[in-house]
Each structure stands twice: as C-alpha cells, then as structure tokens.
Amino acid sequence: MIISASTDYRRAAQRRLPPFLFHYIDGGAYAEYTLRRNVDDLAGLALRQRVLRNVAELDVSTELFGEKLALPLALAPVGLTGMYARRGEVQAARAATAKGVPFTLSTVSVCSIEEVQKAVSAPIWFQLYVLKDRGFMRNALERAQQAGVKTLVFTVDMPVPGARYRDAHSGMSGPYAPARRLLQAALHPAWALDVGVLGRPHDLGNISAYLGKPTGLADYIGWLGANFDPSISWKDLEWIRQFWKGPMIIKGILDPDDARDAVSFGADGIIVSNHGGRQLDGVLSSARALPAIADAVGSDLAVLADSGIRSGLDVVRMLALGARAVLIGRSFVYALAAAGQAGVANLLDLYEKEMRVAMALTGARSVKEISRESLVGIL
Ligand code: FNR
C-alpha cells in the first residue's frame, strides 16, 4: 500500500534495484548538502492556509509553449532510465502521456529517441548535453526533429562531472566497477531478468545509434567521461539554435545573471536547477535560488524549476516561488523502478491529488492563482 509517494516508492526501489543503481539514482555530489537542502528548503516552506473561499472547482492544468499540460509538471531527463525497469523510458513516457504531461528523454537513455516517440501519441521533450563530438549532437537533433520532438531541453550545468563519492562506494564507478556490478546484478536475479541484463547487454540507444554499434554501461561511462566538454559557452548554444526550430529550454540555471543571459540569447525557457544536487555540492537549493530569478526574468521567458520536489505540495510551493511549471526526477524514477508504468501513473495521480488539496486549502482555484501569497513568509 502506498502511503507517501516519496518514501514508499523510494523504499520499494531500494529493495528491487542492485545497490550500484539505487545509489546512482539516490545520491548526489560530495557530502550531499545541496541534495538535502533541495528537499528540506522546499518542505520547510509554510503554505498559507485560507478558508471559506469556494474551492469547489479547481483547475490544475496549465499552458506551456502553446501546449496544454494536465498538470504544471514534466518528467525530468534521467539517464539510464531503461536500467531501472524494462524499456523504462517507454514505460515512463506512456504514463506521462496518458496523464497529459511531457516526458523528457535524456541524451543517455537506453531506448532511442525513435523508440520512445513511436510508443506515445504526444511529442516528448528531448534533452541534450554539450559533447565534444559535435557530430553526435547534430545527429541527435536531426533524429529528434524527424521523430516529431518539438521541445529541446539543453542542459548546461555539466561542463565537468560532479564528484559523486557514493558511486565509487557502490560500484557504479571506481576500481573493479564492472565486476562489482555483475556481482550485484547476479544477486538481484528478479531485476536482472526483468530488465534483460542477463539476456542481452544493455544498449545505450542514442549513443549506439550514432556509433553504429551496441554500447554497454562500461562503454557509456568511458564515452561520457571522454566527451563532456568544459569549453561550452553561449556560442555553442547559437550553433545549436541553427539546427532547432522548436522551443529551447536551458536547464541548470541558478543565478539571475545567467538567467538574463538566457533571455538575451533568446531562450524560450529556463529550468532553475542544480541537477538534483548532483553537480556542485554547496550551491543554493533551487527553492532558494528561484525567487530572485523569477523576479529578474519571469516576464521574459518561461521559468521552470526542479530539484527536491517530492509531492504535489512541493509543486505548489515551487509555483508559489515563481515557477511556471516544474520537473520531477528521482520521484518518478523510484516509482518506475518499484512498479513500472503503473507506478509512474499512480505517482502522477498522487501528485494531482496532493496539488488539489494544497490548492483548496490555500484558496487557489487555478494554477495562475498560486503566488507568493500562497506562502507565509519566504525563505
Ligand atoms: C539526472 N539528471 C539529469 N539531467 C539531465 O539533464 N540529463 C541527464 O541525463 C540526467 N540524468 C540524471 C540521472 C539521475 C539518476 C538523476 C537522479 C538525475 C537531473 C534531473 O534531470 C533533474 O534535474 C533532477 O533529478 C531534479 O532533482 P530531483 O527531482 O531528483 O530532486
């Protein structure tokens, strides 16, 4: 029985996944201060209870880039999602599409852009990293457009990988990692059989499609390590703009000055994010960074936010701080690992229910009516 989406699915995911995968999802950078603050700063925000305001009719939908979203929420790009459940990207995308919210496919997915887009009736979002291999980037953009993707999420907070010590402890990286992963997989036969690990090696869809050969987890880690590009600058974004016709969202903004640069560049949206506390430990939580950014650029482009959202209440809090919509990462991944598509579908229903309760009891009848007035005091 599900009591709370955030804790119960997380616990179920931990039971189901081999440790190297669970900790890869669950962990953050260095001592994980920012990871914890993302959650704590949001949860610590007091919602302002209002009563007797006729909340019989609530509208939880919103509009973004000319499209209607059933909830002001999208699934965040999460690498290796197809390792947490069989064809995991397809399962999560189906749950999201059925609910009427966007699914974002990571560059480093197990299922390819084509496979995921074909499996659903609405356009998915596609996330791209800047990689040294510009040929890969062009190829991915062309394939995404051809498949029918309209919205590009461009992640800019990874010029270098964060220091993730949990991965070294768990066997995701570090000495003897392949052997340790194999051993852990063997100790989780139900998972291994289910995702196909023992049957056939994992294939990193988008990367394999480009390289023209199957790529497993070890190739992926090597390829990614060699391909992250610390020379990334606004010029690279202009280069990408030539190849992308639809809305472009820049993910990983944490400072109002960078947000203003995104406006000058002509971005359609930004995602206020610290990558779920996985990059630079010690930076501001998204909840703390968001109000100043929303004040600076909220009227110029769509300000979205992620990092630390674990419930529908948190969605309302982020909107109150100035976000037009939010993305959820770990929260949906735990549900997917625990119960596949049905888990993600159930999670999204829980988010909606929780949002409705929070809106009714703060007196907001629509998403537009959620404002800083919905909070008592501010961080
Ligand atoms: C991520 N995130 C991420 N972001 C991105 O742009 N491309 C990616 O491939 C990934 N991969 C990834 C893997 C895992 C396991 C996690 C947990 C996260 C970051 C993600 O999109 C989002 O910013 C955070 O997950 C948001 O924080 P919460 O919701 O997890 O607290």
Image (cartoon, helix red, strand yellow):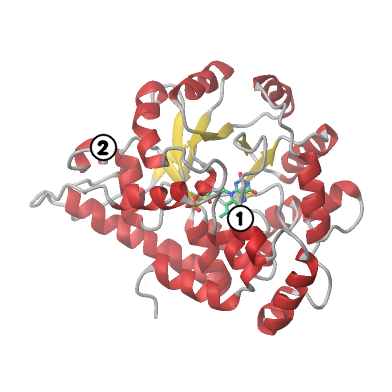
Q: Residue furthest top?
A: 264
Give the position of the N terminus as an image quadrant: bottom left
Taking 59 as reference, is 218 left or right?
right
Q: Secondary structure at mark 1?
A: helix
The residue that label 1 is drawn on is 165
Q: Residue at x 83, y 35 (%)?
A: 133
Residue 15 or residue 202, whichever sits in front: 15
Taking 203 as reference, is 279 left or right?
left
Q: Residue at x 51, y 23 (%)?
A: 258
Q: Position of residue 115 (x, y in %)?
A: 74, 57
The residue that label 2 is drawn on is 371
Q: Quadrant of residue 176?
A: bottom right
Count the numbered circles shown: 2
Near mark 2 (Cα within 10 A), the count class, few <14, some 14-19 or many ≥20, is some
Near mark 1 (Cα within 10 A), the count class, few <14, some 14-19 or many ≥20, is some
Q: Quadrant of residue 229?
A: top right
**Alpha carbon separation for disc pair 1 and 2:** 38 Å
Q: Residue at x 37, y 41 (%)?
A: 287
In the rendered image, the vertical position of residue 342 relative to residue 282, given as above or below: below
Q: Position of residue 223 (x, y in %)?
A: 82, 48
Q: Position of residue 172 (x, y in %)?
A: 69, 62
Q: Position of residue 139 (x, y in %)?
A: 82, 38
Residue 345 or residue 88, whichever sits in front: 88
Query: Looking at numbered disc 2 in the image, what kind of residue is underneath it?
Result: Ser
Q: Secondary structure at mark 2?
A: loop
Taking 371 as reference, is 341 left or right?
right
Q: Do the CB atoms of the residues marked 1 and 2 lie less than 8 Å apart?
A: no
Give the position of the C terminus as an image quadrant: top left
Can the viewer see residue 367?
yes
Can the viewer see residue 84?
no
Query: Looking at numbered disc 1 in the image, what kind of residue is underneath it?
Result: Tyr
